[in-house]
Amino acid sequence: MKKLKFLIALIVLFSCLTLGVCAVEQPSEINVGYVAKYGTVTSAFYEDTKGYGYEYLNGLLAYMDGDYTLNFVSCTSWQDGLDKLDSGEIDIIGPMFETAAGDVCYTSENFGECTLILASVDNAQGLIDDLSALDGSTIGVPDYYPDYSVLTNFLQEQGIDADIMVLPSLELNITLGMNEVDYVFMSSLQTQLGLTVVTYIDAQPVYFVGAPESQALLDEIDQALIALKAAEPVFESQLALKYSSYNYTANAYISEENYALLQEKGTYTVGVRNFNSPLLQENGNGELEGVAFVMLDMLSEAGNISFEYVELDDSATIEDCQNIDFLVAATDDTLALGFPYESGSYLSLPCLLLDRTNKETIETIGVASDYRISNLLEDGKLYGREVVQYATVSELQEAFDADEVDSILFTVISFNMIRDQFQNQDFIASTVDDDLEFVMAFSEDLTAEELTVFNKLIANLDQSVLDAALIEYAVTPQATSLLTMIKDNPWVVFNLVVGIMVLIVISAIVSERKRRLLLSKIIDYDELTGLSSKRKLMQDAQVLMEKNPTIQYDFLSMDIDNFKHINEMYGYQTGSELLKIIARNIGQRLTPTTLFARATGDHFLMFFERDGQGSTEQWLAFEKELQHSIYTQLDIVAHTTFSMGIYEVKDPSMDINIMIDYANIARTHGKGTIGFTCYYFTAEMAEASTISNRITTEMVPAIQNEEFVLYYQPKFELKTERTIGAEVLVRWIKDGTVIPPIDSFRCLRKMALSKR
């Protein structure tokens, strides 16, 4: 009997131990919930689209004790995700900031910070100094936020009375396009239509969340986070640089219902006019042709719809446009014609800025009327210059020749078409950072659903077809004069048909090759210095690293200290000559495997093999030689010094944009120091840059919240033993903690210089 009881007790004990082991054993698959367009996966229709949380979790797997795989589960909203947590359908969801929503547990370690902001649909608005402007406004909050108490607390603290509207996430782009809200509550982990930040609300850490039953899994994630941050200190900042943006990610999925909606109407009326540019221009027969018609043909085929065209002239009024559904190109005056809504961009073109070299000051800039520049204006000016608009590109060129304007803005394609027609060649052409976006303007009679479907069709356009059309139409109209002559003289056809066909084919091939080479030269090379563009350097560097995986490479970022002062003291022509001297002298010293480019302004980039390039002292000697060349070739008194930053490439698979960002961080690390500086990038610099950016983000709200406190340090006179005054010290106290003055005042000075 005793043996039987002992045996039963042994079986019960073994069963309990087995159940205990099974209870703590983690599943091999982790089901991760996510909300589309927020943090983890950035598209509602393509579940393999990566995001911040997606890459963070996959990077974390290598540091977890168990052998796990990740299965991502789409949730329609945060509440839907919390419900799935409660039902056990998912194990964790995130990243999200800590709220009072649901009975959930958070990871102890955070996954970085997200910046909470208010953004405006009006791209021209910018940061607002007086928050009372928010009074009476309507603020939209996407329904994927679990809790927006941060926003309501902010409004209460600022004494702002505003309406809050919860917006369905899948209809967010329609709601914004219809201007139903004045501002949108956003975060840096969110991808959405290009918006303008009007004020910063807070910066909060984000976490992954699980049900209480998943506490063991959350603990293991915490340990892996600690190990990851110790082993890869810049991992988090790399992801932040990659994913912190407010650019729209188009939902390009088109349903059968979407197609049926357009086909119900069948035929749409389109307004077109001659812009005398590759977008729309007259051919030799007086008919309109161009890239816009190619785009419309693609839309017609994709949507199984047809278009009727109404040709408009420059004097068209709102009455002329009564029965038109949309205009092929939105310009700055289409709103006055009754077309308040715009499509997504179907064509984006880089631009050139032509400045006269015989002008001491550049005060005016000419643009063509089909260039939509309203989103580039600041205080009504473009690049600080008064804007003068002309109907066509040809009129713009003629105005420049007649000295009516000091500078003009061209797309590279338009400049390629008429560059030989300039009578006055006394100008400098340089690239600008802004591209011109071409969009359609829709009538207010179209429904929001129709606008959405047209935007989806545009998002699915084959850009390679439009690029080919650009090359086809970037040719002067005079090329058709031979066809006109043949039409007027039929006898030529019978006598010269074979010769003409051969000449046409040869001419087309040669012309095509020249156009391609010229277009490539304009895009890939800097007009002023002849150096490679930043785009070409990045492409060539990628090829070198892929072909030579065993060779170690470095990126160098370099600029001229106080270059703005040189322009102001000696004029822009002298500044341009200085840039050309630098480009010429450095270019003569390069090895065949070294790449050198002008990024923008006085900012240069170099990519080179690490072996043989030397130390900081050798870079200093290099600067001395460069200074000597400048002073012997250019008559200036100002002492020219340089700031350099170097990033040593450790992982060739890293995004090249991030490599250049790191070199730039190292370059700016020495700003404020007199004379030549050269620094190699370190993880501490990235961390300092992150801290500086966070402090800069929080600076304006801190001033508004009166977080800066004055302390008075007495001044004591030894002779009379009396207090004769005091020195005022300012300290920033946030949440009971004093921000180190060396950090806060460095950022405050940077903001003041930027504002100035």
Image (cartoon, rainbow, N blue to C red):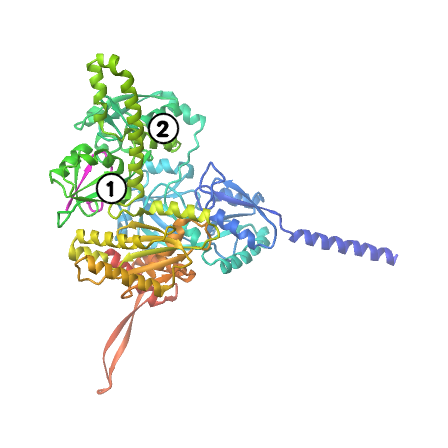
The picture quadrant where one finds residue 501 is top left
The image's mark for residue 450 is 2
Residue drawn at (38%, 33%) of the image: 459
Residue drawn at (43%, 53%) of the image: 238
In-image side of 58 versus 591 (left or right): right
Report the residue marked by disc 1: 352
The picture quadrant where one finds residue 310 is top left
Q: x%, y% of residue 497? A: 27, 16
Q: How many marks?
A: 2
In-image side of 471 versus 481 (left or right): right
Indicate the quadrant containing the C terminus: top left, top right, bottom left or bottom right.
bottom left
In this view, 181 is above or below 655: above
Q: Which residues, given as a range, are shown in magenta?
A: 363-381
Q: Disc 1 on helix, strand or loop? A: strand
| Circle 2 residues within 10 Å: few <14, some 14–19, many ≥20 | some
Q: Disc 2 on helix, strand or loop? A: helix
Task: Spot the residue most to the right.
Answer: 1
Indicate the quadrant containing the N terminus: top left, top right, bottom left or bottom right.
bottom right
Residue 148 visible (yes or no):
no
